[in-house]
Image (spheres, helix red, strand yellow):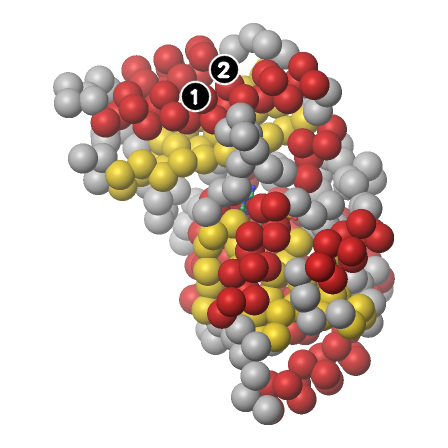
Amino acid sequence: MKVYSRQKPLRAELERLRQRKKKIGFVPTMGALHEGHLSLIRKAKRENDVVVVSIFVNPTQFGPKEDFKKYPRPQSRDKQLLKKEKVDFLFMPSVKEMYSEGYSTIVTMDAKLSSMTKVLCGKSRPGHFEGVLTVVAKLFNVVNPHRVYFGQKDYQQAMVIRQMLADLNFDIQMRVCPIVRDNGGLALSSRNKYLSVAQRKSALAIHETLRWVKKAVSRPRKPSLSAIKSQARARLKGGGRRLDYLEIVDPESLKPLKRAQAKMVIACACFVGKTRLIDNAIIRAK
Ligand code: AMP
């Protein structure tokens, strides 16, 4: 595995491979890798000749009171894992390498054209998706991949990036891969490292609640979505948890739904102690 911290030499090397008609798959991450990340990497390995992984904890997607400083950065462990997966290139730039002094351009979705970045996580984390879109666009310009791999775990992020790819004419195919969970059903996340044993147990209620909602909307005599949502929110009360949001939304526009429809997404963000966890499920009503 070749490791690069500078964009120029990586760019040059990947350009040579592209000219030799090699297909390039790219998996952007913030590191502290787990099986969720590895599932994306394995899919990228199956579908491409060359796989590039980036590890970059992007400061512009963190709010001022969020965990940018304490976000886990187990560099040598991450490198070991990627070597084991036979990843070809690892890009680990510094903040300076990605954001040159005086940078002034950011990628924003126009709120007049779409509310996608203003709902769910966008509402609780102002500026978050601007940071995500900006860094992802920059990374795509460095790597120039044929295919990119994202997790359904961050459903809203995947949808927002998909929209940007179309809007800004990126010639890139996007794959969204299923959520990887631990044995108890907790969605794997680098932030799970912050949880104590008791908090981890309490966090299981998130997935349990999503499953309960899935069942509730599939019942033959469907109760109203608002009744289902309030019951679901009540289920998440207590146990050291504080609900940020629980919504049932349209899978494309991410707008909250009043009535059940053929395909829906239930999305949830919940603090367990100080750790903010997100999860979601796609519901196909029968
Ligand atoms: P992160 O390092 O948290 O920015 O995540 C990098 C990529 O891995 C994103 O596309 C995430 O959606 C994806 N990812 C994170 N956790 C999981 C998971 N449990 N299952 C599947 N994909 C995941």
Q: Which mark is residue 23?
A: none
Residue plotted at (72% across, 20% down): 196
Residue 195 occupies which quadrant of the picture?
top right
Residue plotted at (68% across, 26% down): 275
Q: Amino acid at mark 2?
A: Leu
* Residue 81 placement (x, y as % from top left): 73, 54
Residue plotted at (60% across, 30% down): 277
Mark 2 element type: loop
Residue 135 occupies which quadrant of the picture?
bottom right
Q: Is residue 99 left or right of residue 52?
A: right
Q: Which mark is residue 236?
A: 2
Foreground label between 2 and 1: 1
Say if mark 2 contacts mark 1, CB within 8 Å.
Answer: yes
> Label 2 vs label 1: CA separation?
7 Å
Q: Quadrant of the C terminus?
A: top left
In the rendered image, the vertical position of residue 32 relative to residue 102, given as above or below: above
- Which residue is the extreme one toward the left? 221
